[in-house]
Image (tube, coloured by chain):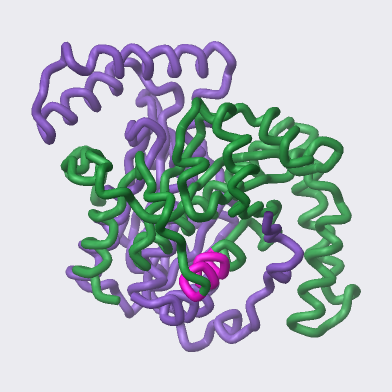
Chain colours: A purple, B green
Amino acid sequence: MNGTDLIHALQNRYACKVFDPEKKIDTETWAALEASLVLTPSSFGLQPWRFIVIQDQALKESLVAHAWNQRQVADCSHLVVMTAHRSMPENHIDANIRRMIEVRGGTAEALAGFRSMVAKFRDSAEQQGWLDTWAKLQSYIALGQFMTAAAVLGVDTCPMEGFVAAKFDDILGLHGTDYTTAVLCPAGYRAETDKYAVLPKVRFEAADIVEHR
Amino acid sequence: MNGTDLIHALQNRYACKVFDPEKKIDTETWAALEASLVLTPSSFGLQPWRFIVIQDQALKESLVAHAWNQRQVADCSHLVVMTAHRSMPENHIDANIRRMIEVRGGTAEALAGFRSMVAKFRDSAEQQGWLDTWAKLQSYIALGQFMTAAAVLGVDTCPMEGFVAAKFDDILGLHGTDYTTAVLCPAGYRAETDKYAVLPKVRFEAADIVEHR
């Protein structure tokens, strides 16, 4: 992709207010978007998340009331619920180490130094009270990558913070797990009636927010 | 861009450990990457950030010691320092409203309801102690969008959390401002000697982190 096409795709992206409920993301396009979730970078490669992808209409409808009645939750093609660890347990670090060995070979002994460093980071973050925030920050990288990936594929999205996380956790069965709902991203295709689609995008001038040194 | 090319670009992306200091991002490519920063989506469109882009070699070198001596900070082509509001002031909301009017027309009176809602959100976040976290979360959307944009343009990046924010704030003159260093993203081109470039990417299996409902 060249720079001009990228800018065009990002200019065309907006927070979709009205999805066309009849237009679904096809299997091949969804596969690429799901890959973009899986491939999201994270601190230490720890991937402290799970992504719940909802297409079931009744389940989507049951969540609308807990997202300020925003219809995008139900009218989108795929609702992505990004969940993050509340307090990433040490066994998640071990799962990551096992996966490293599976993919790259090597031994747990060779990775002992790495494991120790990550475990210290984890314990320090927990003691200082920001382990949950750290995991949530990682999920926002996934949000950014997913929206950008969707934009370059011509898929519309709507990032959403305005929801009742406890209700989402209830309905999605996350209580009793270490995961909690971090942020939402409905994806699909804009309805022709969405008047927000044609509004000029509001951003500060580059000169006001980008400083060169 | 099609899904196959997107997956290829994201597979090719990795946390670059060794940049080639001789390879610089050209003007046209940088313009697209800077546009990707400016166009980053944010909650309420508030853009609670400033991006400091550093090409000055001496300035980059002075930051290395405060980022665990990671040479990427100095050897990259463009070092992007993503800063976020510590405690977004109400006048930032007003600046956003003025920009909305400038871009879309309309009046402050017509936007009074929106302004009031956002100001309430701001005050509530401040009282509950998460206004700084909220702003930092938004900067991670920028991080995600920037890394993905770079990947599709064939530019290498290295997201970095491991740095001493207070030292960065010192050197960059952010003390006394409402901005603080949130996260770093050196960008440029990988050196041929970077052995990490050819390691298989470690991600959990999609089946283990993506749940379909």
Q: Is residue A132 visible?
A: no
Q: Main secondary structure of the magenta part?
A: helix
Magenta span: B28-36
Question: Residue at the spot x=24%, y=19% of the render?
Answer: A94
Question: Residue at the spot x=27%, y=17% of the render?
Answer: A91
Of residues B190 and A87, the one drawn nearer to the viewer in this rendering: B190
Is residue B30 rendered to the left or right of residue B199? right
Question: Residue at the spot x=69%, y=53% of the render?
Answer: B50
Is residue B41 rendered to the left or right of residue B20? right
Above/below status of A100 relative to A9? above
Q: Position of residue B175 (x, y in %)?
A: 81, 36
Of residues B178 and A86, the one drawn nearer to the viewer in this rendering: B178
Q: Position of residue B102 (x, y in %)?
A: 80, 80
Rendered image quadrant of residue A181: top left
- Residue A60: say if magenta: no
Q: Is residue A155 visible?
A: yes
Is residue B7 rendered to the left or right of residue A142? left
- Which quarter of the figure is the N terminus of chain A placed in? bottom left
Q: Position of residue A120 (x, y in %)?
A: 42, 12
Of residues A92 and B73, the one drawn nearer to the viewer in this rendering: B73
